Image (cartoon, coloured by chain):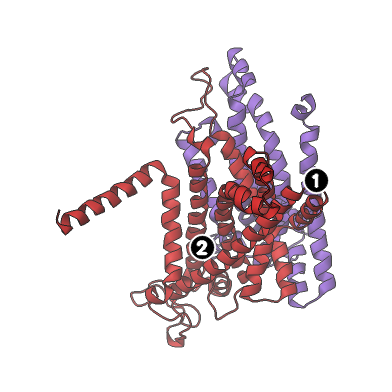
C-alpha cells in the first residue's frame, strides 16, 4: 500500500468518525466545537491576533468595523478583535484554576465527610451549607473585597464558591460507592482508609464530578466577567470580557460594537462548555442511553404506556446545574 | 427597591418559564419542544449584564422607547417607576427563566405520563382540561421548590444590574461598601441579602411538606 493511499484511508476514517459524532452525539459535538474554538483562540492568542491588545492608536479611536480592524476599535484606538481574543486567555485561565480549586477542594471535603461520617461529616457539611447560603456573585464580591482585587484572588474566590457544590456531589457519590462490596472487600484485606478512598472510591465517583466541572467551568467564565465588569477582577489595561463591556458602556451610542462583541464571544464560550457538559452527561449517564427514540408524549393520540426513561435525568440535570449556580 | 426589582424579575422569569415549559412538555419531542429547549439553552448561556447592555442598546438608544437608567419611587410616579424597572427586570428575569423552564418541562413530562392522567383521559376529560387543569397543578410542585430558591438567587444577582441601571438598592450599597472600604455598610447589606435568600430557601424546603402530595404519602 502506498503512503498516499494510507493517508487517504486515514482521512476518510477521521471524516466518518466526525460524521458519527455529529449523528449520535450532536449536543456533545456542537459543544466541543465551540469550546475548542474559544480555548484554541485563548491558547494561540499571540499568533491569531493581528494587533497587540495594548497598542494605543488615538487617531483611530472608536472606528467602526473595517478591513484593518475587523471588529472596530475602542476608545483608545485598540483593536477590539485582538483584545477579545486575548481576553479569552484570562477567562479560560481563571475558570480553569477556579474549577480546579473547587473540584479538588470539594472532592476532598465531600469524600472525607462521607467516609468518616459522624461528627466530621456533620461539621464539614454544615460549613458547606454556610457557604451555600450566600448568593454566588455576592460571595465572590465580598471575598474579593477581603482578599484584594486581582486575578489571582478572583480565581481563589470563584474556586471557593464552587467547593460546596462539588463537596455535596462528592459526598453523595462516595456514600453510594461505599455501600459496594469492593469497598468492603478492600477493608477486609486491610487497606488503609486513605488507600481505599483514593484507589477504590475516587475512580468510581469521578464521572458525575467531571460533568459538574464542565457546567462549573461555564459558570466560572460568567462569574469572572461579572467581577471584572464591576472592576473587581482583571484590572485595565489587561483585557477581559467583563471590563471591556464595562468600559464600552460609556460609548454605546457612538460605538455599539463595544457592547456586543465581548459579550457575544463570552456567550459562545459559555454555550460551548454548557453543551459539552450536557453532552458528556448524556454520554456517561447509562440511564440516558436507555432512551427510546421517538417516545412522544401526546395525551390525545394514544393511551399506550409511554417510556419516561430519560426524563428523570433531565430533571436531575436541571438540579445539578442549579447546584453549581448557587 | 431591590425587593421590587427582584419581584418583577421573578414575575418575568415565571411568565416565560411556566407557559413555555408547559407547552414544551405538551408537545414533547416535537418542534415546539425543541424551540423551547433551544431557548432555555441560549438564555442559560447569556450573562445577565450582557443582556442588560443589549437591552439598553436596543430599547434605550436605538428605539428610544424606554429610559436607560435611573430611579423614581413607586409612590411618587408609578408609571415612570415601572418604565424604569422593565429593562432591569427583563435582564434579570429572562436569564433566570432558563433554569425554571427546564424544571417546569421535566416536571410536567413526568406528570403527563402518570396513571391519574391516563385515568382522566379515559374518563373522557377534554385534552386541554387534562393538560392545563389536572397536570399543571402537580407539575408545579418541583417548580415551586426551585422557584423559591431562584427568587433568593435573583435577590443576590441584583448587584450588577443595579450598577448598570443606576438603581439605588442593596446591590449598590454592597458596591459602595467595597469601593469605599466601608465595612459596616458592606456587612449590613450582605447580611440583608443573605437573610432574604435564606428565608426563600427555607420556604422552598417547607413547601413540599405542605403540599398535598407529600401529605398523602
Residue A121 placed where, x, y %?
Answer: 78, 50
- For disc 1, the chain is B
Q: Relative to A288, is B69 above or below?
A: below
Chain B, colour shown: purple
Classify the position of the C terminus of chain B by image quarter. top right
Residue at point 62%, 47% (across, down): A320
Residue B182 placed where, x, y %?
Answer: 81, 75
Q: Report the side of A88 relative to A228 (left or right).
A: left
Residue located beneath label 2 in the image: A266
Residue A151 placed where, x, y %?
Answer: 61, 74
User: Chain letter for red?
Assistant: A
Residue A86 placed where, x, y %?
Answer: 47, 74
Q: Residue furthest front?
A: A189
Q: Is residue B16 visible?
A: no
Q: Using the rendered view, name the quadrant where residue B127 is placed.
A: top right
- Numbered disc 1: secondary structure: helix
Residue located beneath label 1 in the image: B202
Q: Report the side of A321 relative to B74 (left or right).
A: left
- For disc 2, the chain is A
Callout 2 environment at 10 Å: few (<14), some (14 to 19), or many (20+)?
A: many
Callout 1 environment at 10 Å: few (<14), some (14 to 19), or many (20+)?
A: some
Amino acid at each position: 500500500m502506498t503512503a498516499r493511499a494510507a493517508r487517504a484511508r486515514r482521512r476518510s476514517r477521521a471524516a466518518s468518525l466526525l460524521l458519527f459524532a455529529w449523528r449520535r452525539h450532536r449536543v456533545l459535538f456542537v459543544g466541543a466545537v465551540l469550546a475548542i474554538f474559544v480555548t484554541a483562540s485563548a491558547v494561540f492568542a499571540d499568533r491569531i491576533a493581528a494587533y497587540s491588545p495594548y497598542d494605543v492608536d488615538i487617531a483611530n479611536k472608536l472606528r467602526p468595523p473595517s478591513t484593518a480592524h475587523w471588529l472596530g476599535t475602542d476608545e483608545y484606538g485598540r483593536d477590539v478583535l485582538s483584545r477579545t481574543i486575548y481576553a479569552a486567555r484570562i477567562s479560560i485561565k481563571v475558570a480553569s484554576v477556579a474549577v480546579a480549586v473547587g473540584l479538588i477542594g470539594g472532592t476532598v471535603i465531600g469524600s472525607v465527610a462521607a467516609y468518616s461520617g459522624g461528627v466530621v461529616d456533620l461539621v464539614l457539611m454544615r460549613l458547606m451549607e454556610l457557604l451555600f447560603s450566600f448568593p454566588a456573585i455576592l460571595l465572590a464580591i465580598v471575598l474579593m473585597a477581603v482578599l484584594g482585587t486581582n486575578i489571582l484572588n478572583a480565581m481563589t474566590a470563584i474556586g471557593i464558591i464552587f467547593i460546596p457544590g462539588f463537596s455535596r456531589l462528592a459526598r453523595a457519590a462516595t456514600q453510594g460507592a461505599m455501600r459496594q462490596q469492593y469497598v468492603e472487600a478492600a477493608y477486609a484485606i486491610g487497606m488503609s482508609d486513605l488507600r481505599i478512598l483514593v484507589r477504590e472510591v475516587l475512580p468510581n465517583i469521578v464521572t458525575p464530578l467531571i460533568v459538574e466541572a464542565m457546567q462549573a467551568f461555564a459558570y466560572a467564565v460568567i462569574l469572572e466577567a461579572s467581577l471584572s465588569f464591576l472592576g473587581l477582577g482583571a484590572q485595565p489595561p489587561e483585557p477581559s470580557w467583563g471590563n471591556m463591556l464595562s468600559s464600552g458602556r460609556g460609548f454605546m451610542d457612538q460605538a455599539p460594537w463595544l457592547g456586543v462583541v465581548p459579550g457575544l464571544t463570552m456567550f459562545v464560550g459559555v454555550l460551548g462548555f454548557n453543551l459539552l457538559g450536557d453532552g458528556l452527561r448524556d454520554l456517561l449517564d447509562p440511564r440516558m442511553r436507555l432512551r427510546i427514540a421517538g417516545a412522544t408524549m401526546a395525551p390525545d393520540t394514544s393511551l399506550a404506556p409511554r417510556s419516561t426513561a430519560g426524563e428523570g435525568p433531565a430533571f436531575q440535570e436541571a438540579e445539578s446545574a442549579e447546584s453549581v449556580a448557587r | 427597591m431591590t425587593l421590587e426589582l427582584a419581584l418583577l424579575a421573578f414575575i418575568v422569569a415565571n411568565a416565560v418559564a411556566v407557559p413555555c415549559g408547559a407547552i414544551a412538555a405538551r408537545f414533547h419531542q416535537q418542534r415546539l419542544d425543541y424551540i423551547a429547549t433551544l431557548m432555555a439553552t441560549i438564555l442559560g448561556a447569556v450573562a445577565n449584564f450582557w443582556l442588560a447592555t443589549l437591552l439598553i442598546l436596543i430599547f434605550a438608544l436605538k428605539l428610544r422607547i424606554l429610559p436607560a437608567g435611573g430611579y423614581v419611587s413607586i409612590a411618587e410616579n408609578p408609571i415612570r417607576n415601572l418604565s424604569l424597572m422593565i429593562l432591569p427586570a427583563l435582564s434579570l428575569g429572562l436569564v433566570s427563566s432558563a433554569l425554571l423552564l427546564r424544571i417546569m418541562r421535566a416536571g410536567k413530562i413526568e406528570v403527563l405520563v402518570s396513571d391519574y392522567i391516563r385515568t382522566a383521559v379515559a374518563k373522557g376529560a377534554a385534552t386541554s382540561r387534562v393538560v392545563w387543569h389536572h397536570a399543571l397543578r402537580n407539575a408545579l410542585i418541583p417548580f415551586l421548590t426551585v422557584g423559591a430558591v431562584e427568587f433568593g438567587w435573583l435577590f443576590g444577582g441584583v448587584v450588577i444590574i443595579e450598577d448598570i441601571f443606576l438603581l439605588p438598592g442593596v446591590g449598590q450599597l454592597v458596591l459602595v461598601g467595597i469601593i469605599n472600604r466601608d465595612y459596616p455598610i458592606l456587612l449590613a447589606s450582605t447580611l440583608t441579602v443573605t437573610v432574604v435568600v435564606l428565608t426563600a430557601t427555607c420556604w422552598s424546603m417547607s413547601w413540599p411538606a405542605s403540599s398535598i402530595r407529600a401529605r398523602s404519602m
